[in-house]
Image (tube, rainbow, N blue to C red):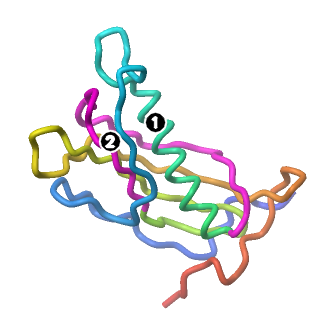
Amino acid sequence: MTDIMTDLTAVHAPAISETTPLGELCTRTLAMPADTNQNGDIFGGWLLSQMDIGGGVFASKLAKSRTVTVAIDAMNFRKPVFVGDLVSVHATLVRIGKTSITVHLEAWVMRRKEKQFILVTDGKFTYVAIDDQGLPREIPQAGRPATA
């Protein structure tokens, strides 16, 4: 079996900025009442799924193929998300391997009556590029950033 996590290109994870979103905007959605937990706050699983969708969009663009999530590391739920918050997910490349892509994701919200984005969640997600049969496939060289 090939080593899925072979590190061909490494990029340091970005320093967390709590004032400005870092990385590429991948998704933006509005938190709705149907997304709440028993306390009336937005359910953490909903937010995690929004981040995974955004990371998948980012990884698939780099891989030029379908990708699947294989790991989620170091999730930090910093602040709650409320109904009516505009949720934006931003992605920054951490590493590209032979078949895998690791992405740092940040979820930011713009609350009603606020003028500044607020960092609510961040984490590291790893995706594997797959072929039409669901097997790992190599990421094309064109999908990889230039190395120094």
Taking the magenta stretch, the answer to whether it contains residue 80 is: yes
In front of the other: 139 or 42: 42
The residue type indicated by label 1 comes to: Leu
- Which is more toward the observer, 95 or 28? 28
Main SS, magenta residues: strand
Q: Residues within 10 Å of mark 1 (few under 14, many from 20)?
A: some
Q: Report the front residue among 54 and 8.
A: 54
How far from the left and from the top, in percent, is residue 8?
A: 63, 75
Residue 100 inside the magenta-drawn segment: no
Task: Specify which label sits upstream in the sequence, 1 or 2.
Answer: 1
Q: Which stretch is magenta? A: 64-91
Residue occupied by mark 2? 121
Q: Which residue lies under the disc numbered 1?
A: 48
Pinpoint residue 77: horizontal percent, then vertical percent.
31, 35
Residue 2, image quadrant: bottom right
**At x 54% / y 61%, what residue is drawn?**
58
What x and y, as percent, mark residue 39?
A: 29, 11
Q: Residue 141, relative to residue 63: is it above or below?
A: below
Name the outermost residue toward the bottom. Answer: 148
The percent coordinates of residue 33 (x first, y second) are 35, 21
The residue at 68%/49% (across/down) is: 68
Q: Are marks 1 and 2 in contact (CB under 8 Å)?
A: yes
